């Protein structure tokens, strides 16, 4: 019988790797986890957590104006960027230490350094080698810049939280959720913001009403858009004190804008380059590790979860995949994760959230059987606070029973509301179930119970 150093060796201490290693250890497995960065992964270090803190910070600029409508006189403040930046990093480091303590309590050995394969059962971390009966890859993804002239002068989301000075003129290249969120954040913090996109609206793949309402809200907040841009024409030139972005707009006209900082937010890709996957014979398809339903690769003892598999790239999904792997392999309770009806949020300004099918996807699948209920209104908060903020809610149903296929929302507290409402879609609920649920008044969420 072959002897191994560990029952399970996990590569990557992000959300999925942490969840899998701790769960496997509770079943008695001898587990090690390797990480060459802070413990916690993209979400904790340079993703969801610090980004959400920046979203909160960006909201304070609106408070003096909104408070005036309620009788409060609050003078406009001034952002101390270095204080905000350093406070966020302090919280990141606190969470890093917390995750390390959780590993220690779970008897998971943390090995500092980047791991790569030597062979199918052996990994190297620096000058040390370790063998394992099973190996789990949970290395996540990384920001990818487009191959365009001058792109070396652009930053990615990785650097957004460590900027030495606050950029008064800020540009975003890309219309996905990361670029859209940072555009709103920086505008709220006081920058002049321009977003440059290839399409004619942001958030490709989302429901069209969500895309339209978010973009309209961003425009009303003062964000400048260049749409339909020929991406191949885009270049960045560096000067002594700023950067110039040159491109052809949707009408073919040459445009130039000068900014202090450019964020390239054109996508992410699995972080596979450091792994030497070929040493273990692991199959890669379209730049991602190919896995089966149970997260197993083409090697029966090697598994992969999270963003490096490019299935659904969300933190809760990676955590669920990691726990399902441990339950199946070490808890002997086989279970698999469904990658459908997963709620998601865009912490844009205005905020958006969705679960289930978009109207467009629903009509592709069910045609004329689809019915849509929709409402748009000004939230009660703004009746005194002023402003043009609107909330859009949408309920997508199918058939005579009006089974709920999807829920869409743009507006204040969208993520919190859709998280709760996602239960209706997951359980296969119908509109009558919402109709029969007593509404809580006055709230925005009650609109889902009273739509006609």
Image: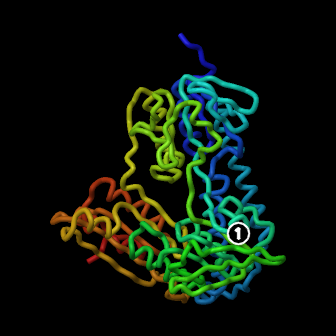
Using the rendered view, name the quadrant where residue 235 is placed. Answer: bottom right
Question: Residue at the location (57% across, 35% down)?
Answer: 278
Q: Nearer the viewer, residue 1 or 424?
A: 1
- Tell which of 334 and 1 is nearer to you: 1
- Decide: is 33 above or below 387: above
Q: Position of residue 300 (x, y in %)?
A: 45, 28
Give x and y (percent) for residue 308.
Answer: 54, 46
Q: Is residue 127 above or below residue 141?
A: above
Q: The C terminus lies in which quarter of the figure?
A: bottom left
Question: Which residue occupies the foreground of this view, 78 or 380?
Answer: 78
Crowd rating for badge 1 (residues with CA inside 10 Å; few <14, some 14–19, many 20+): some
Which residue is drawn at the image coordinates 44% and 79% (left, top)? 212
The kind of secondary structure element at disc 1 is loop
Badge 1 is on which residue?
150
141 up-or-down from 216: above or below: above
Q: Nearer the viewer, residue 209 or 150?
A: 150
The x and y percentages for residue 338 are: 37, 47
- Image side of residue 313 versus residue 355, left or right: right
Residue 67 sits in quarter: bottom right
Q: Name the residue at the right extreme.
A: 240
Q: Where does residue 62 sit, x and y in percent of width and height?
A: 63, 81
Residue 187: quadrant of the picture: bottom right
Relative to 422, 88 lies left or right: right
């Amino acid at each position: 019988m072959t002897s191994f150093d560990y029952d399970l060796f996990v590569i990557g201490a992000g959300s999925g790797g942490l969840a899998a290693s701790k769960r496997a250890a509770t079943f008695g497995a001898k587990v090690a986890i390797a990480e060459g960065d802070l413990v916690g992964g993209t979400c904790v270090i340079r993703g969801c957590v610090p980004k959400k803190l920046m979203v909160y910070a960006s909201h304070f600029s609106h408070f003096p104006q909104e408070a005036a409508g309620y009788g409060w006189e609050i003078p406009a403040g001034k952002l101390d960027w270095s204080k905000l930046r350093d406070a966020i990093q302090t919280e990141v480091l606190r969470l890093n230490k917390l995750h390390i303590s959780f590993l220690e309590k779970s008897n998971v050995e943390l090995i500092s350094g980047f791991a790569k394969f030597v062979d199918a059962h052996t990994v190297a971390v620096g000058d040390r080698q370790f063998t394992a009966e099973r190996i789990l890859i949970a290395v996540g993804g990384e920001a990818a810049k487009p191959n365009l002239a001058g792109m070396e002068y652009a930053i990615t989301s990785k650097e957004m939280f460590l900027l030495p000075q606050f950029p008064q003129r800020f540009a975003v290249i890309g219309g996905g959720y990361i670029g859209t969120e940072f555009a709103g954040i920086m505008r709220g913090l006081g920058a002049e913001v321009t977003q440059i996109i290839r399409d004619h609206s942001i958030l490709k793949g989302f429901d069209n009403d969500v895309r339209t309402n978010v973009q309209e809200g961003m425009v009303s907040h003062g964000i400048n858009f260049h749409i339909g841009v020929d991406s191949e024409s885009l270049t960045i030139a560096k000067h002594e004190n700023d950067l110039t972005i040159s491109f052809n707009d949707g009408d073919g006209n040459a445009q130039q804008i000068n900014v202090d900082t450019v964020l390239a937010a054109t996508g992410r890709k699995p972080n596979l380059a450091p792994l030497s996957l070929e040493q273990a014979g692991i199959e890669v398809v379209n730049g991602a590790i190919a896995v089966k339903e149970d997260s197993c690769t083409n090697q029966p003892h090697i598994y992969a979860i999270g963003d490096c598999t490019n299935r659904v790239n969300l933190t809760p999904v990676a955590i669920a995949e990691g726990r399902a792997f441990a339950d199946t392999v070490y808890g002997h309770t086989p279970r698999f994760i469904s990658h459908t009806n997963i709620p998601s949020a865009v912490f844009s300004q205005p905020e958006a959230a969705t679960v289930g099918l978009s109207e467009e996807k629903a009509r592709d699948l069910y045609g004329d059987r689809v019915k849509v209920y929709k409402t748009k209104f000004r939230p009660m908060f703004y009746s005194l606070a002023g402003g043009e903020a609107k909330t859009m809610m949408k309920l997508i149903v199918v058939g005579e029973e009006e089974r709920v296929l999807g829920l869409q929302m743009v507006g204040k507290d969208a993520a919190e509301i859709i998280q709760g409402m996602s239960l209706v879609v997951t359980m296969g609920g119908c509109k009558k179930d919402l109709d029969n649920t007593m509404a809580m008044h006055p709230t925005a969420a009650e609109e889902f119970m009273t739509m006609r």
